Amino acid sequence: MIIAADGFAQNVFFYVIAAAMAVSAIRVVTVKNVVHAAMYLVLVLAGVGAQFILLASEFVAATQVLVYIGAVVVLVLFGVMLTRAKLGEDVNLTNDYWWLGAISAVMVFGVMAYSLLDYYGDDPLGAEPGNVESQIVGNTEQVSDALFGQYLVPFEIISVLLLGALVGAIVLARKD
Amino acid sequence: MDDVMLNQFLILAAILFSTGVYGVLAKKNAILVLMSIELILNAVNINLVAFGAHNGTIAGSVFALFVIAVAAAEVGVGLAIVLLIYRNRHSVDLDDVAQMKG
């Protein structure tokens, strides 16, 4: 682990970014403008990338920025544009049963928070000392070794899945 | 509070996940529902990488990369379906898409 023994600075950054992410995530599902929701989604996704860096997984963080902020958000904005959502004016985006969704979300969070705090308590993030592999976690070299060694077959299957999704999206969206 | 704990990442992911669950259940714009699904998938990714760091293995990061790839495929096909619905019905309101209601 590249995580320092004294994690004070890490904790400060964690809580600052986590607060921004939580506020932005709630704004994504509460603002009345689809484009603003997409912009808040960018903030959440960038925060997730920052958390990956705090977890010493810099390759996943770079992929997060490239794929999510670079591609997915642009795709979503194109979707907003092509479906002609009413830009610049506030519309009601919430259905009549939103309170059932709110109750469900609060219950899901309660159950998850209770069981996580009950089971993991104050467990430190770093692996137990003496674990040799833990010294090299988060290294881009290690990711590539695992991806093209142990996980080569799933990696190839993912490429076939992406090809299938590409062809499927074109077939669905083109005008005949 | 000097120690970085596993739980703080897991609780943050739980907040993102439940926000996404609320969005999927309460929103009637199909594109907002897709955005909420992205929130849920990102919460899972934080969990995977945090557990990978906790266990001292690289598997968490690799699995997070797979999740990102599948999410990219999902949003591509999902938006194509939403565009198709819009072209046929001139609306992306999910409450209107109820032809198969009994």
Image (tube, coloured by chain):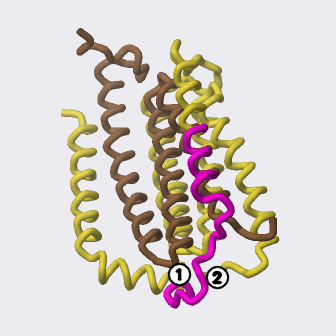
Chain colours: A yellow, B brown
In this view, the residue in front, A4 or A38, is A4
Q: Amino acid at mark 2?
A: Ile
State left or right for residue B88 relative to residue A24: left
Q: Which residues are magenta?
A: A110-135
Position in image of residue A68 (x %, y %) = 50, 55
In this view, the residue in front, B24 or A11, is A11
Chain ID at mark 2? A
Measure the alpha-carbon separation of dots 1 and 2: 8 Å
For mark 1, give the secondary structure.
loop
Q: Which residue is disc 2 drawn over?
A: A2
Count of numbered badges drawn on the protein:
2
Q: Amino acid at mark 1?
A: Val
Q: Residue at x 61, y 36 (%)?
A: A28
**B63 to A76, vertically: above or below:** below
State left or right for residue A141 relative to residue A53: left
Check the image and name the residue furthest to the front.
A118
> Disc 1, disc 2: CB below 8 Å?
yes
Position in image of residue B81 (x %, y %) = 31, 34
Q: Residue at x 57, y 88 (%)?
A: A135
- The reply to whether the magenta stretch includes residue A131 is yes
In this view, the residue in front, B81 or A100, is A100
Check the image and name the residue furthest to the left.
A176
Tag shown at residue A137: 1
**A55 to A68, vertically: above or below:** below
Position in image of residue A147 (x %, y %) = 35, 77
